[in-house]
Image (tube, rainbow, N blue to C red):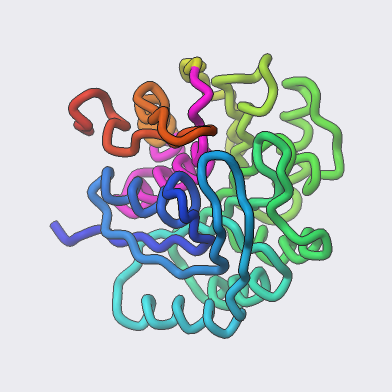
Amino acid sequence: MPTAIALTIGGSDSGGGAGIQADLKTFTALRVHGCSALTCITAQNTTGVSRVDALPPESLGAQIEAVLSDLPVAALKTGMLLNAGLIEATAAALAPMAIPRLIDPVMVSRAGAVLLEPNAIEAYRLLLPLAELITPNLHEAQLLSGQAITTAAEVEQAAQRLLELGPAAVLIKGGGRPELRGRDYLLQRDASGRWLQHAAIDTPHTHGSGCTLGAAITAQRARGLPLTEAVMEAKRYVEGALRSSLAIGAGQGPLCHWHGYGAEGSQP
């Protein structure tokens, strides 16, 4: 069988727990060749981010063009885009593509840290209609939908509003509220919404879990799985990676990407 290839567009995490590093580790764990296009470089570790440097939009466009001109990318995802210029460059590059495109609208971390320049929120509306799936956390879903989210019913309402912005499907991650831990809500344009349940893993070491979920979905789409099945498999992978999360550094450790399917790292 030909090698499945996936592309991640996002920021570098020098601590290796999230961003491009987490995406590439996930792709490798799921037997997909990973390519990358960097949007920004962060100085960070398990205790936080101390500096962010954005790359020029022209550099991002050149990276994406170099990958696509040579390699048959089967699916892609976006992560931290930081500013309007980088979002616009990403939208221009993605518009002609006819492959599965996952947009993770990285604006606010699950803990509430802002990861996007304020004037760039509106620019995300250029990207949303290009997405097969968007994967906001609760904070991001609130910002994009303009609706407060405190209950499961409000998650469902926000997902419907987000669907009206153009993506084919929405997955709102519920991990930011204790009562929604282990629950994500998937709404597709041509299907009824459904709550997806998985075990709520009791660990403080969850750095990069959102990036990892998006990368795992992207990898499974690159391998040819239908969207719903790709989401379910990705959630199973993340659950295993959380069970074996790494207590490294002085702060919040990352997932263990090579143990995503259990102690032996096996997968179907």
Identify the residue at the far left of this view: 1
Instruction: Check the picture and name the quadrant holding the N terminus.
Output: bottom left
- Residue 97 visible in the snapshot: yes
The number of callouts visible is: 0
Residue 117 occupies quadrant: bottom right
- In the image, residue 25 sits, relative to residue 267, either above or below, namely below
| Main SS of residues in magenta | helix
Residue 119 occupies quadrant: bottom right
- In the image, residue 91 sits, relative to residue 2, either above or below, namely below
The image shows residue 193 at horizontal and vertical percentages of 62, 30
Q: Which residue is drawn at 47% across and 16% down?
A: 199
Give 96 or 256, whichever is nearer the viewer.
256
The image shows residue 90 at horizontal and vertical percentages of 59, 71
Instruction: Check the picture and name the quadrant holding the C terminus.
Output: top left
Identify the residue at the far front of this view: 250
Residue 267 sits inside the magenta stretch: no
* Residue span colored magenta: 203-231
- Residue 188 visible in the snapshot: no
- In the image, residue 157 sits, relative to residue 15, either above or below, namely above
Residue 92 occupies quadrant: bottom right
Give 153 or 237, whichever is nearer the viewer.
237
Q: Residue at x 35, y 46 (%)?
A: 26
Residue 224 sits inside the magenta stretch: yes
Q: Is residue 153 left or right of residue 80?
A: right
Q: Which residue is drawn at 32% across and 32% down?
A: 260
Q: Residue at x 49, y 60 (%)?
A: 12
The image shows residue 168 at horizontal and vertical percentages of 60, 51
The image shows residue 198 at horizontal and vertical percentages of 47, 19
- In the image, residue 113 sits, relative to residue 111, either above or below, namely below
